[in-house]
Structures are given as structure tokens and as C-alpha cells.
Image (cartoon, coloured by chain):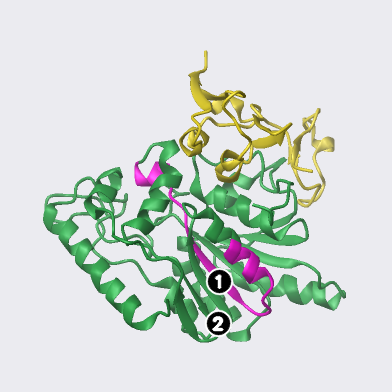
Amino acid sequence: MKPYLREKAPAAFDEIPEFPSYEAGFLTTKNAGWRNFRPVIDTKKCNGCMQCYLYCPDGVISEKDGKAVIDYDFCKGCGICRKICKFNAIEMEAEI
Amino acid sequence: MSVLSKDEFFYGHKACAGCGGSLAVRIALKVLGERSIAVLPAGCMSAVGFNFPQLCFGNNAIISTFAGTASMLTGIRAGLKAKGIEDFHAVGFAGDGGTADIGLQALSGAIDRNDDILYICYDNEAYMNTGIQKSSLTPFGAKTTTTPAGKNIHGNMRPKKNMFEIAAAHGIPYAATASVGYINDFISKVKKASGIKGTKYIHVIAPCPTGWGISTDETVEIAKEAVDCGTWYLAEFENGEFRLNFRPKEFSDIGEYLKKQSRFRHLTDEDIKIIENSRNAKWEFIDNNFRK
């Protein structure tokens, strides 16, 4: 499990939790708009060593079928994954 | 990597791209797991983690007073013990200012009582959250908004406080230094600390692209280089003894490390010489007093 984006963000007063303690991992907004460059994984070159996952400050990289995949909703495009990758499997592409 | 939980407990936060502090918090929580209660004083990690109603922690987490990280950890441990709950980690994440300046008294008190808590200081070497002001962990020569670099005074004139050895001087059960550039070392230290009873202190260097003046993809490299050029070291304190975990075969060029960061770009060759000399003096002390 990880914190996930809720379908409906609280908008009115009566939808906001009454006390300042409420459900953990309650996300209402994405971070995708922060990004100028988007890391793109070349699945041919990726061997699933997952070093990018280890060093991602946002934890947006996970493993699927032996390859790294990125959650673009929350990736900020810092580029650490590209520099960590020993196989040059990650390219940064400009967001349009 | 095998000790890490597959779950993410610090996700969707609003830290700057390439933030070293958020990497340290994320990895530490992945080691400690869901049954950990995180305490965050004022500082970057509480500012980016709790943006109501966005709540980025997947475990229990709470904001403390700026000075009270360690005392709130003490209270959580005592309160849950009274309710019969003991199978959890009480972990605090405070910045360098929240540890070495404002929270030092509470931390010292907790170590003195030997409360069963883990205190992690993510050190980005200034008050980055409020816009880069000098803390007592800002290194010599660094430019901040309160220690600007001018013609006569070249940034911060005071050396970095030795927080690791201050914690160790209490006779703490376990203290360690780490760097997000050597993440496996950090992971094993958090893992080791989680199995020790009593107060544990881990001091992890976590570069801040915004405050250090580096690009967002250089965080990990520069954290590694800090260790390789000898301005930071990886060590542990246990059973009353210091132990060095890693010694670079040969120090990389300290001038090159400094010039990569805009906070040091104003330094003259003489300033760099001063930094180099203080590094050499530090390593002489380490060689004489730390077990290899």
C-alpha cells in the first residue's frame, strides 16, 4: 500500500475532517505539473536493477515484470534516476 | 534493498525536486515499516508532508513543536506503553536547525533518560524551509541569507558543530553518521538502530539543491562526494567506542567539490586551504580515536 490520490477532494466545510487527525496517506493533488522534463525508461536497456527506485526522493518508481516503471502523477522530473542508471536506460524528454 | 518494505510511506509530498531530505525520510520509513510513529518538528519535512488536506505519510505521523521533537517521542513511547502497545518504532525526523540549535535541549534530555526512541537528523546545512538561513550545522564558508558573501567576509565564519560527537558524549547506546549518497550504509544503520533498545541518533547528510546551489539531479552525487573528499565521514558510536565505517583510499579534490555548489563559489584559494586544513585535522583526530 502507499498513499494514493483520492477521487474526490474535500471541497466543502462538512467534507473536511472535523479533527486534525484523519486517514493516513490521503492525497488530493498531483505533483505532475512541477515537471519540465520527463524521465522515460527504455525497457530494452532496463535490466530491473532498481537502483533508480532506491534513490528516487519521491518514491515514484516501482517494479513491474522485471522492469522499472514510473508513476507520472507524482514524478517531479528531478533527473536523479537518469544519473543513477548504469545502463543509460533513462532519457529526459522535455514536457510540452 | 531486501530489508526495505515494498510500501511507500512518504509519497506525494511537496518537497522540491531532487530533495535529499525527503529521500532520507522515505528510505528510513521503508526500513522501519508501517508500525512506526513519525514525529516532525517545524522544518522542510513537516512543511512538505502535511498540506491539509493532503497527507503524505502512510504511517502515523505528527507535527511537534520546533524544540520538542525528542520530548514528543518520549511522550509517544510512554503513552503507548501505558496502553500496553510496545511493538512500534518512535522515530523523529528533524532538520539541522531543529536538532543542533532549537531541539538540542530536548534531545539531550531524551538521551539522558535513555528513552527508547530513534532520532534522525537530516542535515541540509541551513534553515532551508524558511529560505536558507545559517544554522549551527552550516559549514565554514557557506553563503546563506544571514551569512552573505561580501568583499571582507566570505560567508559563514564558523565551523560546523560536531553534533554526532555531542550525541555520543552523552554515552548514547547508538549514534551514527550517514549520507544519502551511500544509501545502503544508511539503510543498514537505520536497520541496526531499530533493533537497539534505548536512544538512537543518526545524522544523515541530505543535500538541498535549492540551498546548496546544485542542479536537481546532482543531490546523490554531491552527497557521495562530500564523503569522498573527506568533509563528511561515515562512522558509528556503540558501546562507548567510535568506529569508522569507510575511509576513501584517496580524498577527491575538495576545491572541485566546493566549486560545484553556488553557496561556495565565492571562496578564494585561501578559504579553500582553510577548509582543507580543517579536514586534515579532523581526519587526524579520526585516525587517532576511531576504531577501523
Q: Are marks 2 and 1 on the same chain?
A: yes
Q: Chain A is drawn in which colour?
A: yellow
Q: Nearer the viewer, residue B283 or A72?
A: B283
Q: In this view, does B279 lie above or below B25?
A: below
Q: Where is residue B95 in the image (x, y as percent from the top left)?
A: 50, 59
Res B247 → quadrant: bottom left
Choose the circle earlier in sequence order: 2 or 1.
2
Q: How many marks?
A: 2
Query: Which disc number belongs to residue B201?
Result: 1
Q: Position of residue B132 (x, y in %)?
A: 38, 49
User: For the residue labelled by badge 1, is the local secondary structure a helix, a strand or a loop?
Assistant: strand
Res B265 → quadrant: top left
User: Is residue B41 visible to us here?
Assistant: no
Res B109 → quadrant: bottom right
Residues drawn in magenta: B188-213
**Contact (Cβ within 8 Å) of mark 2 with mark 1:** yes
Q: Colour of chain B?
A: green
Residue at screen point 44% across, 66% down: B234
Q: Is residue B223 above or below residue B117?
A: above
The verdict on residue B225 being magenta is no
Q: Is residue B122 above or below residue A55?
A: below
Query: Which disc number belongs to residue B172?
Result: 2
Q: In the picture provided, is A62 more to the left or to the right than B123? A: right
Q: In the picture provided, is A21 more to the left or to the right than B285? A: right
Q: Which amino acid does label 1 sit on?
A: Tyr
The N terminus of chain A - image quarter: top right
Q: Position of residue B53 (x, y in %)?
A: 72, 40
Residue at screen point 61% across, 30% down: A31
Query: What chain is tagged by disc 2?
Result: B
Q: What residue type is labelled 2?
A: Ile
Query: Which disc number belongs to residue B176?
Result: none
